[in-house]
Amino acid sequence: MIDFLNKISSPQELRELAATDLHTLCEELKNKVIESVSKTGGHLGASLGVIELTVAVHYVFDTPSDLLVWDIGHQSYPHKILTGRKDQMHSLRKAGGISGFTKRSESIYDCWGAGHCSTSLSAAIGMACALKHKGEERKVLAVIGDGALTAGMAYEALNNAATLDQNLIIILNDNEMSISPAVGSMSKYLTKLFFSKPLLKARNFAKKSLSLLPTPLSNLIKKSLTNTKGMMLGSNFFEELGMMYIGPIDGHNIEDLVAILTKVKNEIKGKPILLHIKTEKGRGFIVADKSGEKHHAINIFDLATKTPVAAASSCPTFSKIFGHTLSSIADGDDKIIAITAAMASGTGLTEFEKNHPSRFYDVGIAEQHAVTFAAGLACQGLKPFVAIYSTFLQRAYDQVVHDVAIQNLPVRFILDRAGHVGADGATHAGSFDLTYLATLPNMVIMAPSSDQELVNMIAFAANYDAGPIAIRFPRASSKNTQIPQITENIELGKGKIINSGSTIAIFSLGTRLNSAMKAQVEVSKLGLNITVVDMKFAKPIDEQLIMKVCASHQLLITIEEGSIGGFSAQIFDLIQKNNIKNIELKSLYFKDLFIEQNTYDEMNKISGVEAEDIIRVAREFIELTPQDKIIKKLELV
């Protein structure tokens, strides 16, 4: 039985195969990807869509000498298998294993670390310029999806690339699908190019024919033809930028890909080239559920039946709770608008889109535009809710500052996936939103401790018109099967005492309340009943409640799912300003490091924000001798 893949541990061995063997290799590679993801979960659809492309690029080009840059990197599983990580695929996205994205420290074949989209072109341009500066004649290839072209950064890079005489090859992987279906004019334009093949062939034939004529006559004919309605010799968008455009090409035809890439490699130099290929996301993976997202991210599944190993939970996620609640509130408030940046399903907005299609906007992978677009809506008295993962809002920080906060516009930010997110690792962790938002004047920040609090906070945000407001919550699910109803009116900046005690108080933000309550139970076994407060707001903080607790306690512990400078910093600043000397403050927040992929719980343990961390701090304080405590108080004074 033929088994080409088993004999390949590097692209050098791949290049020893005959071109006629590549089709069989592609089938083997596809099966290996499916088998691997069935055991680990991961981004299956994107990887299956680039099987032939991955084989062709490594077959034709001299990687790693020639540099291959993957945009996002979630489609790189075939690339990992062909570049020496085949036997490590069982560890994909697991603690201590290989990353679900490209990662520079993992392999010399990963020349660019990714995780967010639309960075590949800028990085590749930088690499191409660096190689030219060093006098090295190597190729640089960037693979970018059509969905990623909705981001402004990609356009900036295209504009710059066309002005440089570099050995840069841009491969546009056009599958009409990012995570949600691709939206916007570029997607429609690429589709138009694809369905205009006869026109393109005629145009190319005409160009070749004109090249045989004397230059003056050729130029005269070109000028007259390009002014006609048919634009037979007109350029497309990419050619107008100054690039050589080739395509569209069937991205699953390995023979054509190899032939075209070979020609590009050997015959075209010193000019940026854009190779437009058409692919199908999720190609070769047939299941009963043909969802629109084409198996973008899939859980562990049974290889024979292609069904999930773990039964789907009947409890709704926080994302779904948000979307359902917002849709229900919007039934009675026609000013509410929902905005997403290509993450309708991920942020729970599919129900809103279905029920209120005229008030739903998917702007594509364009977080910066989403924020300023929302600011424009708010200027005219509407109530925009911008639902973006915490890690992706970082890309629009300038817009949050300049276009929203400075103008004090009532834009509602819904920050999904706040805190750690598990297998996607450091690139997707929502670790910094508390810090980067809490520094902004006019900003209100809320964090629900439960599904019930989330519902109440959404209702509060819908009626809050005094300025920008953010609700951040982790990738979590309710403990109940039913989505709760709105039960109370939240008061701005007010927390709630959950358990009254003495000596030690825990101020908890968000779902860390569960850890605080577990710690309270354990500490009570030591003979001390401690106070637990659900603060609800990271900004503004409940100053009156904080001052009251500080007056009657000796140790204050804060806990949050975020980096230094967020919730605890607000409390510390208040204590300092009020010159409070009789209380010791211990803050538990994420450690100053990027944590690699792991389970959600393990990442929180590494970060030091679990119940045992609270217990440790409380126990250390309790075990101090009376004399030690006197010394502590003197030190504080």
Image (spheres, helix red, strand yellow):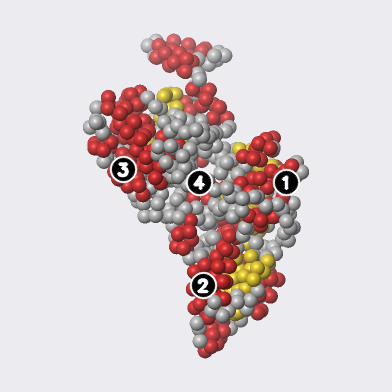
Callout in the foreground (1, 4): 4
Which residue carries the number 2 mark? 615
Residue flagged by tag 1: what amino acid is it? Ile
Confirm whether residue 471 shows in the render.
Answer: yes
Q: Which mark is residue 329?
A: 1
Q: Earlier in the sequence, mark 3 or mark 1?
A: 3
The local crowd at label 3, few if under 14, some if 14 to 19, many if 20 or more residues have their Cα within 10 Å, is: many
Residue flagged by tag 3: what amino acid is it? Lys
Using the numbered discs, state the Cα–Cα distance from disc 2 to disc 1 in whole angstroms: 40 Å
Residue visible at 59% across and 55% down?
Answer: 479
Residue flagged by tag 2: what amino acid is it? Ile
The local crowd at label 2, few if under 14, some if 14 to 19, many if 20 or more residues have their Cα within 10 Å, is: some
User: Tags 1 and 4 in contact by the CB under 8 Å rule?
Assistant: no
Q: Quadrant of the N terminus?
A: top left
Q: Which mark is residue 86?
A: 3
* SS assignment at label 1: helix
Residue visible at 51% across and 34% down?
Answer: 289
Residue flagged by tag 4: what amino acid is it? Ala
Q: How many marks?
A: 4
Q: Earlier in the sequence, mark 4 or mark 3?
A: 3
* SS assignment at label 2: helix
Residue visible at 30% across and 31% down?
Answer: 25
Relative to 83, is 552 above or below? below
The local crowd at label 1, few if under 14, some if 14 to 19, many if 20 or more residues have their Cα within 10 Å, is: some
User: Tags 2 and 3 in contact by the CB under 8 Å rule?
Assistant: no
Q: Position of residue 111 (x, y in %)?
A: 36, 44
Which residue carries the number 4 mark? 311
Confirm whether residue 576 shows in the render.
Answer: no
